Amino acid sequence: MGSQIKDVKIPPNSPTQLSLVKHADFIAAYGKKKDDYEYCITEFLRMSGVYWGLTSMFLMNKQEMMDKDDVIEFVKSCQHENGGFSASHNHDPHLLYTLSAIQILSLYGCIDLIDVEKTVEYVSKLQQADGSFVGDKWGEIDTRFSFCAFASLKLLGRLDAVDLQKAVQYILSCMNFDGGFGCRPGSESHSGQIYCCLGALAIADSLHYVNADMLGWWLCERQLPSGGLNGRPEKLPDVCYSWWVLASLRIIGKLHWIDKDKLRSYILACQDEETGGFADRPGDMVDPFHTLFGLAG
Amino acid sequence: MADTCCLAELGEIYFCSLNQAFISDPEIDEVDIIPCLHCQEEQKNEREDPIIIVNHKLGIKSWCIKPLFLFAYKKLMRSRTEGKKDCNLSVTESVQLSRAVLLVNAECYTAWNTRKEMMSSGVLSLEDDMKFSGLVLSKHPRSGETFAHRRWTIIQLEKHKGQCEFIQCCLRAELAVSLRAAECYADNYTAWSHRAWLVERFIHDRKRQVLLKHLKNICSKNELVHLLLSELDFTSDLILTFPGHEVVWYHRRFVYHFWNERFGDVTSRTVEFREMSSSTSNDDRSTPESVNRTSRRYSPSIIPSLFELASGSFKLLRELNAGFKSITSVTGELEEDTLTPMSTPSEVRFCNSAIAGCTGPEGEVQRRCSSNYKQWIMLRSKPSELDCNGTASDTRTIATGS
């Protein structure tokens, strides 16, 4: 218990330059990979996977490397009769993948290719009497879903379709003594959940409810001596938090509270120079999720 | 990789073996994959059984996972094409296929949904499904989809049995299942959130009034003082005995916050930053207490587990509950004097003693925790004075420990 230090050492020969060409190749190749098992085992989040890949490509200005028609065709084919989108064919509609689908179409600027009204109806029906949102018809509640609903409706220009005030009240009921947020009232603060709650509050113009000093301090304490950011106290650093934490700090105007140079070298060290792509920590396996959040950071 | 056709056939064989295993031992309570990195030979022998059961623990050999999953996943998903849902699968097949899929990939939400549909239509028993999702948690203790599915099933069980009976016959088991998952990883977010949900729904809701009455009866100001001081001592002891643990410092913040919410910290507003960062060395290495701590730190048998820590808190609460009547006699002295323990100066003093004599990597973390804690207290007590521009550089230096 006493001796384990929860941080990583960046190996001396780690990458220090951003290899954009490699990352674009990595994402492009990932989309074409047809290994049956890999494909099937990740199919339950395909829609989000496509969004992560495509956003990475857009960030690198390499979006032409993914086949636009294929992507749009795939998205359209995942819309269900109730208006929601599923992660892939034969899967069930869910708010998480509905947001990813809307984000993909928004990136391409062709949101009008789907039945927007039906989608709005699907999202707004997921709001509960207490203001919270469920993820699908089975009723799981989570502040992540509040964010998904707000972001979806904002992109569709239909925030008026839900009760914003009640939704904001629910999010605030998930605020903790440290200024952070958890998935439900009383749940521990978590960087990913904080991003969702702050994002939702920002969309609803309600950031004045947030204690920016306390929350900013909790967030910048996520930076470890290696420069990397973790998601909660005593957890290992992970590249994806460079997005969740940085974006959160940006929303509350405290970005300068962390050491940018150290974080930059940590993120760069998580690249795989041979295959392209980013991993969670230096030396680990790369994937599109961490590639997007590394690039975004 | 062998060609897909053979894999599919093999997958069906392994699928049958798995089903057979659950028939031969209906009491399977734990599952895991047995890594067989060097059993190419074994794999070639198709009659080799991929399943091992010992003492109700199910082991699946790693070489059968891919074909097994592919077979079950494709067959299950094909049946869900919109318009012809479940058209060609029997209930037994759906139960077995979703079981094989979820044992390998617990995040496959659509597979969980097929089970919810079967429970809704009454063809799959809620209890059987609870047993199965418990089994999945033994292999995937952090699976968010599994816990979400369990919450849905619990709500159905509650509707079915009524809340009283659910609490009597299922709540204890549910707490045990989630504690087991929580103990696999000390910081298992999904498992602890699930437990918080249980408490909120079944203990808080139903006993709210009882609890409130209870609290009103037992918690006078002095008693709360006693509870918080004991908790403060508890964190002090842990911090000094096991230096370098951010979570204990974090808990101390909660205690500090809770105290100051109720009793206010009059002294903190007058303390200057200079005083907070000054290090009046308060080395306690030579005291008997610290010698005792050093021996505890290096003796593994005395290091408390999470479970012991939890039961330590329960013990504390029990003592609190039982001991109040006797405490009231001494609480006369506890008035103004005891408010100083959780004041800013006393916490600064504690921080200085916590970092004194702390060396090595643990000491480094301890120093970071300590200065972050002091900075947190300052932020908390004078938030309005903290202008981003003014304190940016201080803040950065302390938080990253550079």
Image: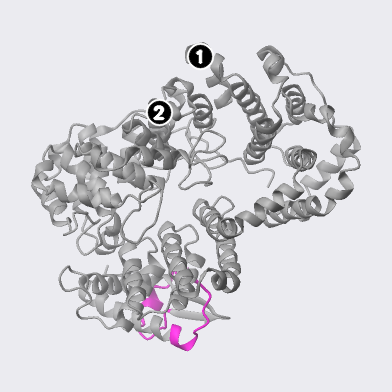
Identify the element where label 1 is drawn: loop
Identify the element where label 2 is drawn: helix
Please say whether residue A276 is visible from this viewpoint: no
Q: Which chain carries label 1?
A: B
Query: Which numbered circle lies on residue B240?
Result: none
Q: Quadrant of residue B8?
A: bottom left
Instruction: Answer left or right for A116 relative to B121.
Output: left
Q: Quadrant of residue B16?
A: bottom left
Q: Quadrant of residue B124?
A: bottom left
Give the extent of the magenta segment.
Answer: B22-50
Instruction: Answer left or right for B138 relative to A244.
Output: right
Please say whether residue B127 is visible from this viewpoint: yes
Q: For mark 1, does the 10 Å Cα neighbourhood hold few (<14), some (14 to 19), or many (20 or more) residues?
A: few
Residue at image coords 30%, 74%: B72
| Quadrant in the picture for the N terminus of chain B | bottom left
Amino acid type indicated by mark 1: Asp
Amino acid type indicated by mark 2: Leu
Say above or below: B359 vs A142.
Answer: above
For disc 2, the marked residue is A207
Counting from the top left corner in percent of width and height, residue B393 is at 52, 15
Residue sitting nearer the eye, B294 or B308: B308
Instruction: Answer left or right for A82 relative to B117.
Output: left
Instruction: Answer left or right for A272 relative to A228.
Output: left
Both marks 1 and 2 on one chain: no
Counting from the top left corner in percent of width and height, residue A139 is at 37, 58
Q: Mark 2 lies on which chain?
A: A
Residue sitting nearer the eye, B115 or B54: B115
For disc 1, the marked residue is B387
Q: Is residue B89 magenta?
A: no
